[in-house]
Structure formats: structure tokens, C-alpha cells
Image: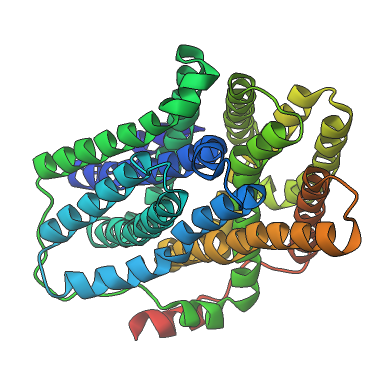
Amino acid sequence: MIWREIRAILQSELNHIERKAIFLAAIGSMLEYYDFVIFGLMAIYISHQILAGTFIHSLAGSVIFGAFFFGYLFRPLGMKQYTDWYNHGSSQKINNRIIMLLFFATIAIGLAPQKPFVVGIITIILARSLQGFARGAEAQSEFGYLYRNLEQKRSIAVFGLIAGAECGVLFGVLINDILNLSYTPAQMNDFGWRIPFFIGGIMCGLIYLLRRLSRIKEYNQTIQPMIPFYKIFTMFRGQVLFAILLSGLRASLAWLLLLLIPFILSHKLHCSYRYIGHLMLLSTLSSIVSSFLLLRYVKTRHSRAILPPVLIINILALWLFGLSISYNHHIATSLVILGLIAGVVAVLVVRILTGFFPSSTRLSSVTLCYNFGHTIVSGGILLLIVLLTALTHSLILPDIDANTIFLYTTISTFSILTIIVLFLSRKVKYFTDYMLLNKYVKT
């Protein structure tokens, strides 16, 4: 999929300025997903090192998942703050401020102290919150820059953002695999888990230099915000609800593969980190392969038709994974299947969402639904899984291993979300009335 999206950009009728705008936005998207993947994969080490031996060690997963969610909780605040910053300063100074916030937040996680553990926890939560805030401002900067520079070609920018995101995921998984091959488990526990965050800091510096060298054009006029969410919801109520849930499902599948599954493999089956890294690389590669094959052989007009069977297969694959964990057999096979489905869903989400919204509002609508899906749906599901696991283990099934309850709570929650999306996919129609749209665009 990565090379297909890049090829689509190169073959489109874009001038040098427009291609540069997409590239600068894509590298920001790459950094965001690298941070996302690395925090998920390193969460195992963080929970063991910072929380091991404390009275909340049994709640280590909940604490780490909560810190992970804080990053997305503060993202909308960063998006709003960017507009205020922009109207009181130059875009170059604001971009420099944002990248410095990202740099300090990423480095702070890598430098989080192990003792006292309270300081380590607070450092990680504050760093993730700052990271999410800065990423929200960074995203708004990217979308605003694309909005001003691409005029009527904004929809092609989606390809660049997707390519950047997938490069970030692949790079993060490869870094994790290389580290697990280079260091022993003891070394990874001791200091190796910090290295990816330092690499993230270096990436921030490189992006800063690239943007300085690119000489981003300054704008003196007051920023014109994209169509507000409430107007988009008024125009496309059913489409927005479905788009948010579908985006949330896509984000949740990413969390499942890169955060929840490594946690389950480590705590329930006590797999080595090196083995977990190999499995994550395998599932990531299968996801990229499936997305490429879908883009290569399935037409866009067929995307909605194949979504329902993909969702049904997703439910079956989730329970197949649960059984493979319970019996400790065919784990790699089940993860490959989940990776294949995640890649297909990633492609379908972009295709279907762009079909719901006309080109003049496409970037705004897809961006808003994407962020709401990530923040509210997938973030809420993560916390819901932790809460249901704790309640079930404490009040209903105290004799059953908490990791087993966590596994099947995760599968059940994901299955219910998939069923809801499957139901709505049959109800929502493509938007065809452009008269109502023109009313809002002109105002």
C-alpha cells in the first residue's frame, strides 16, 4: 500500500509546491504513528521496569493503557490551540514550537526514572499528554497547510497521509525487531526499551531541519478554519456516525495488534520479547501485503460490497486468536490472519470514507471523523476493556485468571463493535445531494 499511495501522488498532476506540501504533512504523520507503535510495543518493558515490585504491579496494564489513552485525550485540545497560536504568530514559529514539544515529550518518556515509581508514572503520563497535545497541533498544522496549498486537489493529500502513517508503523516495528535481535531480554529491560524514544527524538530533529530547509511559505491572514464538526454532522449525520465507528474500529485493530496482543502474549503465555517482536513484524508485513493486494485487484466501487464479509471474517478471526492463545497453538497463523484483515480494513476505511463526502469537504470530514474515531471510540474501548476486566475478576469470576478474563473481554468487545459497524454498513447511503453542501461552503 505504501508504494501505491506514493505512486498515486507522483502520477497526479501536482506541481512542486503541492508535492512538497504533501511530503511535509506525510513525515508528520509518519512520526505520529511511529510514536504510537513504539509506545505500544515498549509498554511491556515500561510496566515491568517502572511498576515492578510496587503495590500497583497487578494494575500495571491499566496504568500503561491509561497513559496511552491520555495521548489521544489531549489531541483535540492541541488542534484547537493551534488556531489560537496561528492567529497571533507566524506559521514558522508555531511549527518550531510544536516540534520542540514533540521532542521533549518523546525524550521524557525515554528518560522516565524507575525509582521512585510514582515519579516514573507521572513522567510518562505527563509526557504522553504533552505528546498528544503537540500531535493535535501538528495535525491541525498539516491539514491547514494542505488546505491552503492544494486548493481543489486536497483529496490527493489523503494518499500522502496514509503512506506516511504506514511508513511510521513499519519503521517502529522494524526498530523493535532489530533491538530484540541486538540485545538480550535483560538488556532490553535495563536500557534497550528507552532507545526507540531517543530515535523518535532524533526524528523530531530531522523533521525540524527538513521544514526549515523547505522554507515553508508564511501566511499573514487570519486562518480560515475548516467546516466545523457540527455542520458536517448536520449535513451527513448517518455518514458521520458510521465513519467515526469505522475509523474507531480501524484504530482499535491497530491497538489490538500493537498494544493489547503483546501484553496478552507476555502476561498470559510468558512469551519472550524477541518472539513477540517477530510476531508483530509478521502481522505488520501481512497487513501491508493485504492492503497492497486489495488496492491492486479490487476496484474502489466494490469497497462497500466487500466490507460486510470482511467484518464477519474479522469476528471469526478474533475468536480464532482467542482459541489459539487458550490452547497455545497456531498463534502465528491467527496473528497473520488478523494482520491481513487489519490491512484490508485500513484500505476500506479510506475508500469508503472518501465516498461518503464530496471533494470540497472531503479532507475536513475525513480528518474530523478519523480523530473522533481514534479518540472517543478506540480510546473508550481500551478503557472499557480494562474496566470490564477488573469488575469481572473482582465481582463475578474471582477464581479465574485475570489475563484470561482480559483476553476474552477484549475479543468480546471487539466483536460487538464489529457487529455494530456491520449493522450500520447496511443502513448508511452515499451522499449525493450537493445543494445542501453548497449552502454551508458559501457561508
Compare residues 343 and 401 and report the one nearer the observer: 401
Q: Position of residue 171 (x, y in %)?
A: 43, 29
- Measured as percent of width and height from the top left, residue 203 is found at 28, 36
Q: How is the image coloured?
A: rainbow
Number of numbered discs visible in the structure rendering: 0
Residue 213 in which image quadrant: top left
Q: Is residue 197 left or right of residue 432?
A: left
Q: Is residue 299 left or right of residue 77?
A: right
Residue 246 position (above or below residue 238): above
* Image: 115 above or below 434: above
Please give left or right for residue 367 compared with residue 373 in the image.
left
Identify which residue, 260 or 33, lies in the foreground.
Answer: 260
Question: Does residue 413 appear to the left or right of 59 in the view shown?
Answer: right
Looking at the image, which residue is at 54% across and 83% down? 234
Closer to us: 84 or 134: 134
The answer to which image quadrant residue 130 occupies is bottom left
Residue 24 appears in the rendering: yes
Q: Where does residue 28 sit, x and y in percent of width and height? A: 32, 46
Q: Quadrant of the C terminus?
A: bottom left
Closer-to-camera residue (31/18): 31
Is 137 drawn above or below residue 34 in the view shown? below
Which residue sits at x=41%, y=68%? 76
Q: Is residue 300 visible?
A: no
Residue 243 drawn at (x, y percent):
61, 63
Which of the 4 image quarters holds residue 6? Answer: top left
Name the residue rendered at 71%, 38% in the picture. Answer: 264
Residue visible at 83% across and 38% down in the picture = 322
